[in-house]
Amino acid sequence: MDNSTKPAQLVHCIYTSVANEKYDHDEMVYLLDIIRTNNKKLNVTGMLLYDDGSFFQVLEGDRTAVNALFNRIEKDPRHSKVSKLVEEPITTRSFSEWTMGYSNVTTKELSNIKGLNDFFMDNNCFTELDQSRAMKLLNEFKNGRWRTRLA
Ligand SMILES: Cc1cc2nc3c(=O)[nH]c(=O)nc-3n(C[C@H](O)[C@H](O)[C@H](O)COP(=O)(O)O)c2cc1C
């Protein structure tokens, strides 16, 4: 990659939110279609998890693009209580192959994650994650959990 195409600063941003309605498969497919088309243009990658009414999303890309996108997403009436947990520079993308990977996970699956079992077994949802738990969840993905299932 030469300097003209190198991102100014690669960052990731992780946030959680509460869905304002229960999403069924068709609604999710519709939303993902919009997301993936936009993200391709913005060179933003990442992944989105949905579990029982709450979202967990990782956005990766150039800082300017990620910040502008987050500001747009934050105002989206499809969800509320949007809470940014992490925004920091990264050296490489974790989801370079996904304009937005998506998985509808179950609380049971989340309860199997080492270090997060108690948290999810207590019926906590994504919106109750703190920064360190958010990073643990991200690392599970990096290490391959659900990766093959992302659609
Ligand atoms: C949970 C959630 C995640 C979203 N993620 C993205 C995303 O990664 N990229 C994107 O372009 N839009 C995303 N959207 C949709 C945006 O909020 C917005 O509707 C879309 O970008 C179209 O914006 P516009 O109507 O201003 O053109 C997301 C919406 C929700 C509810």
Image: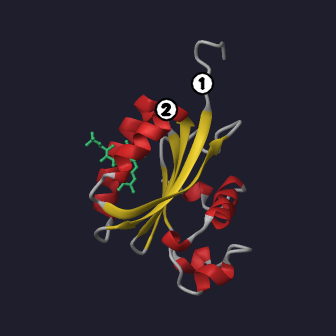
Residue 103 location, x and y as percent?
Answer: 49, 61
Does residue 139 lie above or below 53 as drawn? above
Residue in front for this viewpoint, 123 or 108 = 123
Residue in front for this viewpoint, 103 or 90 = 90
First in residue order: circle 2 vs circle 1: 1
Q: Which residue is mark 2?
A: 64
Residue in front for this viewpoint, 26 or 20 = 20
Under circle 1, the secondary element is loop
Q: Which residue is mark 1?
A: 8
Describe residue 8's horizontal placement relative to residue 53 as left or right. right
Residue 34 location, x and y as percent?
Answer: 32, 44
The quarter of the displayed image where residue 19 is located: bottom left
Q: Residue at x 60, y 39 (%)?
A: 11
Colouring convention used in this rendered image of the protein? secondary structure
**CA distance for labels 2 and 1:** 9 Å
Describe residue 77's horizontal placement relative to residue 105 as left or right. left
The quarter of the displayed image where residue 144 is located: bottom right
Bin the neighbour count of mark 1 within 10 Å (Cα to Cα): few under 14, some 14-19, many 20 and up: few
Q: Residue at x 39, y 72 (%)?
A: 53
Q: Residue at x 58, y 87 (%)?
A: 122
The quarter of the displayed image where residue 109 is located: bottom right
Q: Residue at x 48, y 41 (%)?
A: 99
Residue 50 location, x and y as percent?
Answer: 45, 65
Does residue 57 lie above or below 104 as drawn? above
Under circle 2, the secondary element is helix
Q: Do the residues bearing badges 2 and 1 touch, measured as CB atoms within 8 Å?
A: yes
Bin the neighbour count of mark 2 within 10 Å (Cα to Cα): few under 14, some 14-19, many 20 and up: some
Q: Amino acid at mark 2?
A: Thr
Describe residue 113's horizontal placement relative to residue 57 as left or right. right
Q: In the picture, which quadrant includes the N terminus?
A: top right
